[in-house]
Image (tube, rainbow, N blue to C red):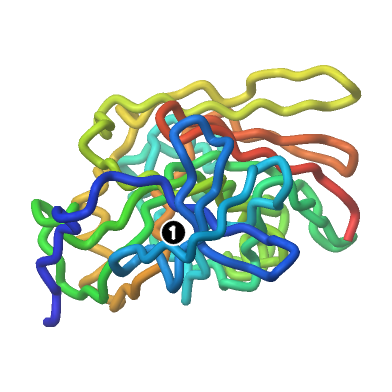
Amino acid sequence: MYHLPIRFGMLLPMRFGRIATPEGMTFAVIDDEGTVAKAIAGTPYTEPEYTGKEYKLEDVRLLAPTLPSKIVAVGRNYADHVAEVFKESAEHLPPTIFIKPPTAVVGPGAPIRIPDFATGVEFEGELAVVIGVPCKNVKAKDWKSVVRGVTIINDVSSRDLQFSDGQWARAKGIDTFAPLGPWIETDLDKFDFSDLPIKAHLTHDGTTETKQDSNSKQMIMNIGEMIEWVTQSFTLLPGDVMATGSPAGTAEMVPGDFIEVEIPGIGRLGNPVARA
Ligand code: MG
């Protein structure tokens, strides 16, 4: 076990993003208004060192805020979603763990590209936890000591492949099936993770409908319990992402649609849907 009890307590709460600038890609601290990005040297997982370069967000492109070695995702973690997708009670079908590859990650605004063989492709709006230190065998009560912050993930899933393949690797691991962002909020204490709204808005044919409108209250395992469970098996590394499960309301997206996931205190993650 090499869980490092670093709390990042010395650092002021911040919002970290990753941006594409004319000079290249860099991590950056984003201001509270979400309008200015101050470039930092290195990553959000160390003491930030400003390079002195500053950009208006409207002049640069936001990228996925982390480059994870893996996304460890907990499936079937909301009772309402288990009933909707699996036609089973959560009691008979407990949470499960799967992995999405880092090559599935795209940033805010980047298209979700659906290949022809992936049918029944649905969005899953989820709270994502970003790891800050290498950790293994973390106790539930210590979860904040290994977490750098939170962001949003859309756990895009081909429902047809999920059931026909059995394994979920392809259904949920196709390139672009892991939109992530818009940034990492590090002030964990500002959130009530036992009562956090999660919404997903789907725009189809010019009409926007709120399809997911739920709350982390519906979670079967809480964040600490999930981190304890996941780190019994996997060493998590700085930048790794743990997806905490989708509530009910997932629905099919087709090329031409726009999907936006919203979590108060973090923001909105929006992506267009296109054909691969
Ligand atoms: Mg999911």
Q: Is residue 242 above or below residue 208?
A: below
- Image point 29% across, 25% down: which residue? 195
| Residue under the image location 39 percent in, 37 percent down | 78
State left or right for residue 242 relative to residue 27.
left
Residue drawn at x 43%, y 53% as measured from the top left: 243
- Side of 223 relative to 114 (left or right): left
Please tell me which residue lies in front, 137 or 266: 266
Q: Position of residue 56 (x, y in %)?
A: 64, 43
Of 260 and 44, the residue lying toward us = 44
Q: Residue at x 61, y 39 (%)?
A: 269
- Which amino acid type corresponds to the residue marked 1 in the rendered image? Ala
Mark 1, secondary structure of its residue: strand
Quadrant position of residue 130: bottom left
The image shows residue 21 at horizontal and vertical percentages of: 70, 61
Does label 1 point to a residue whose CB lies under 8 Å from ligand 1? yes
Q: What residue is pinned by disc 1?
A: 73
